[in-house]
Amino acid sequence: MKPFSYHQPDQIPDAAKLLTSIEDSKLVAGGMTLIPTLKQRLASPPALVDLSKLGSLKGITDDGATITIGAMTPHAVVAASKLVQTKIPGLAELASMIGDPAVRSRGTIGGSVANNDPAADYPAGVLGLGATILTSTREIAADKFFLGLFETALEPGEIITAIRFPVPLRAGYAKFKAPASRYALVGVFVAKFADGVRVAVTGAGPGVFRVPPMEAALSGNFDPSAIAAIKIDNDGLTSDIHAEADYRAHLVTVMAKRAVDVALS
Amino acid sequence: MGNVIGIGAAPKRKEDQRFLTGRGNYVSDIKRPGMTAGVFVRSPHGHAVLRGIDKSAALASPGVIAVLTGDDVADDGLGSLPCGWGITDAKGVPMKEPPFPMLAQDKVRFVGDMVAFVIAETPERANAGAELLKIDYEVLPSVVGVLEAVRPDAPQLFDDVPNNICCDWELGDKAAVESAFKKAAHVAKLSLVNNRLIGNPMEPRAAIAEYEPGTDRFTLWTTSQFPHVVRFLMGALVLNIPQHKLRVVAPDVGGGFGVKQFHYGEEAVITWAAKRVRRPVKWVASRSEGYVSDRHGRDHVTEAELALDETGKFLAFRVNTLANMGGYLSTFGPNIPTNLYGPLLGGVYTTPAIYCNVKVVFTNTVPVDAYRGAGRPEATFVLERIVDVAASEMGIDRVELRRRNMIPKEAYPYQTPVLVQYDSGDPMGCLDGALVAADVKNFGVRKAASASKGKFRGLGYSTYVEACGLAPSRFAGRLGARGGLYESATVRVHPTGQVTVMIGTHNHGQGHETTFAQIVSDKLGVAFENVDIVFGDTDRVQFGMGTYGSRSLVVGGAALSKATDKVIVKGKKIAAHLLEASEADIQFEAGKFSVAGTDRIKTFEEIAGAAYVPHNYPLEVLEPGLEEQAYYDPVNFTYPGGCHIAEVEVDPETGTVTLVNYTAVDDVGTVINPMIVEGQLHGGIVQGVGQALFENAVYDEGSGQLLSGSLMDYCMPRADHLPMMKVATHSTLCTHTPMGVKGCGEVGTIGSPAAVINAVVDALSHLGVTHVDMPATPNRIWRLLQNASLPVAAE
Ligand SMILES: Cc1cc2nc3c(=O)[nH]c(=O)nc-3n(C[C@H](O)[C@H](O)[C@H](O)COP(=O)(O)OP(=O)(O)OC[C@H]3O[C@@H](n4cnc5c(N)ncnc54)[C@H](O)[C@@H]3O)c2cc1C
């Protein structure tokens, strides 16, 4: 780890100002992703701006048709939240499947979404539910937020403050864990709304993506059998030592069916 | 006063008190006054010419004290890292043994090869300095696989090692095997890969060295399984430090599995550097560093053929293997895929003719050496897999085919055609026990239940034997060992009757402090709590070859048993004097010396007291004091074995294999502490299951990059991968070790991979699947099912 200065602002504007005034400075939330890169000297920001004193970034609120989860809410809190369990059980379940207990206690939804790891779980939930990312400056629809491998629509100095999730009729997440890392080798989030179904896939490619043919099929008939024959194109999917692209493509269909089963149960 | 806790009891482990309360003392816990921090700069390339190193910027970096490179090693005239075994080919030509410099000279040969050592005031400063080192590499193509490495056009690691072949080794009667194959009614063939593994002990490697100018003595604290051997190899052969000027300490060590039973270049560099900078130097590896520098294990490509007659009797077995050595020869490297592999190819069967050829091959990968089981898991896997292949091809039940060929209990001692002679065993008894324990009878019911959920269930057997208790020195010497393989123990009885044992083995998780104390408690009648076991320090322990190859109890325990016997002999002499009886009339039992047929007794404590306060003592004929030492050189290997039965369930939709049941009935000879034996079996089995289902070290051909270089990419077995295991022992006694013990440290790892893979193949056999390479990952299983063109996906 290289030396850096450390800041702990208690107002969002102060945090944003630090971030823009110190070049290459970085926000730190749970630190589960960032700190290892510092320890391995892969990243060496001159300053860290810690979000943990920003009270307004914590907590889960019930807005009726939506629920809003503060950016600094750890995965374990989302997993254990009665509100989330009642209104979007699939999302609570997703949070419970992230990493291990230590990671779930420290890692935050804001950090996960900002990081946009291609194998992370939350991006599937956020895109699958058509959530809105609230930032220090604006609101961004999930469909416009995730731009590919570790890329998002966030501008320099922009801070995620919360994620607002519409409450679906039904939703489910099915994750095939990568054997070693236990990130998603393939994870599929399926959400049924009055006006249609959304299907979002993580792990399979360089970034989270939707599967329109499955959405159309499930909008007509919300049952695993409706998508059993829908195959995903291997092109553009990830191939690595854990799984080849065609296997990942196959798993998308399998996990999508299982996610529908979860949503129906 | 505590109690005697003897052989067969299961007390909680003495050492766990300090481990579980955070009071262990590991190398990285040690701090020395004026200590500096060292960082190794390692090659990022698999293969490159080292054109030059510019140290200037690094040396100018704040806090940097020194930068050492291969040139400095050469200037100081230091030796190459030695290989402890020199094997020869069929014609008696010695293996090719290119130098292994402790810091690379002229060339780097694997990603992780050490190029420089940067010493600074703190680890941060050392890292910052290391980043400023300018190293000029001319990158060459790498070769990482054995099949590729022996091709004529392959990159050559060493100019004088054609085709990268270190040794073309063979064992057995080739002609007899050939003629048996001609008569065979059936020949089963199998090509397989034994996957490359990374040991991943919980504690990464670490070392601290210190030089005292006043006494001209060096001390090295290192994460080692064999400190005396490090002292010898490093002092005598690398650094030219006289043995009496070098102390090597291996304190608490957090797991080894073989990874820490080699003399590593890091140890030599740090010890040498400590004198150069005249300050203690400390280095602690990161986990990532361990991946590219801890010696790897296994990595074979094998073609095997088994000849059978029409009744299924094995006539002959022929095995051709290419074994990966990595970039250099590590301490035991060439011994593992040869001497610890070929002699085990007889297994528990009466196969009369066996021939084995092993080409030992250099590649641009981390050096490969012993890893839990070392050679014997590889042999067991080939044999137990091909027995299943033969059974299915000949339409003979797998268990029945094994029975037809098994060595009957009455046939022991049994001479195999591949050097080794098994002293005792009962493979049939282990098999029978395991069949019952695994409830094989009702497997059909369980298989049907799985099928009703769309899953395929399979059962796999491995009836195996291994050779451990390394090793009879004379025998090993003939095979190429360059050292002895005995063990030593000193039993020091204090004037008050408590006992300190100094033993040459090393405890790094095996529970020796408990097991050895039980032996002493049992034999001397001393309370268990009054026995302490000291190990891991060349200044405190006379000598020793360390812990590996399941040798600690078998060889070290035997030395301890002998030394304890000597204490009793001397005690009887003292007692005879005190009780005014003839020595022949003195009996020793339950901690009391008595005159036979009388009630005249002296307690063990009284005798100890008399030995150290010799007022009334036969000083004319007996020295005072009560301390005895014994060295023990085994007369044979020991041959633990058994039967493992794995039961798996395969999800054809995803290819996931779930281990649902596991049963092991093993013959480990006398059991000193059943709880510890059970723990060793559990751990060993899990390591074998890891190899079979999860673990795989993968290199990129061409660049030589390790693609599985972290826990995110190298899959270790975890608790939730495993069912509750049923383990039991079915022991026959070893005929030549003092207590009848055979060793249990590796049996689990040796028996289990074949059992698991045989179960996976069984689950998929109805689809025409005949073999699955390890690890049987979901992707790999799915691919097999695709090729079997199964209508599984869509339903
Ligand atoms: C062992 C392990 C296992 C894991 N397994 C999984 C898994 O199975 N599935 C999974 O999805 N994830 C997994 N993770 C990742 C985990 O979920 C992390 O918590 C998450 O990726 C990052 O969250 P964090 O709060 O720790 O962020 P940090 O590490 O603190 O930050 C990550 C990045 O996001 C930025 N950032 C943080 N907060 C904000 C914000 N509010 N606004 C803008 N930018 C921000 C930071 O600057 C940084 O670049 C695992 C991590 C570990 C260490």
Image: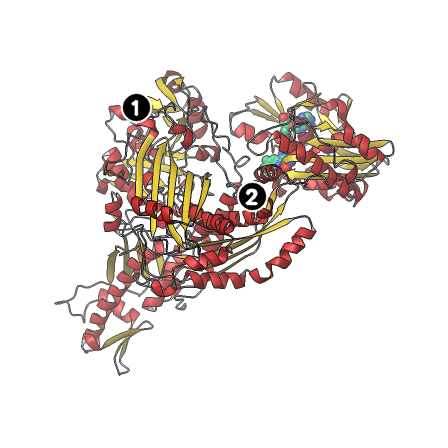
Chain for disc number 1: B
Q: What residue type is labelled 1?
A: Asp
Q: Which amino acid does label 2 sit on?
A: Val
Q: What is the x, y in percent for residue B207?
A: 37, 37
Whether residue B82 sits left or right of residue A86 in the image: it is left
Out of B772 and B574, give the one closest to the viewer.
B772
Q: Which residue lies furthest to the left in this view?
A: B620
Q: Which residue lies furthest to the bottom in this view?
A: B598
Q: Can residue B762 be seen in this view?
A: yes
Whether residue A34 sits left or right of residue B255 in the image: it is right
Residue at x 43% of width, y 23% of height: B45
Res B767 → quadrant:
top right
What label does residue B769 carry, if any?
A: 2
- Which image quarter holds the C terminus of chain B? top right
Element type where label 2 sits in the image:
loop
Whether residue A167 sits left or right of residue B179 in the image: it is right
Q: Residues within 10 Å of mark 1 (few under 14, many from 20)?
A: few
Q: Can residue A52 be seen in this view?
A: no
Q: Do labels 1 and 2 share a chain?
A: yes
Q: Name the residue under label 1.
A: B159
Q: Identify the mark nearer the N-term, 1 or 2.
A: 1
Q: What is the x, y in percent for residue B82?
A: 28, 36
Element type where label 1 sits in the image:
loop
What label does residue A11 carry, if any?
A: none
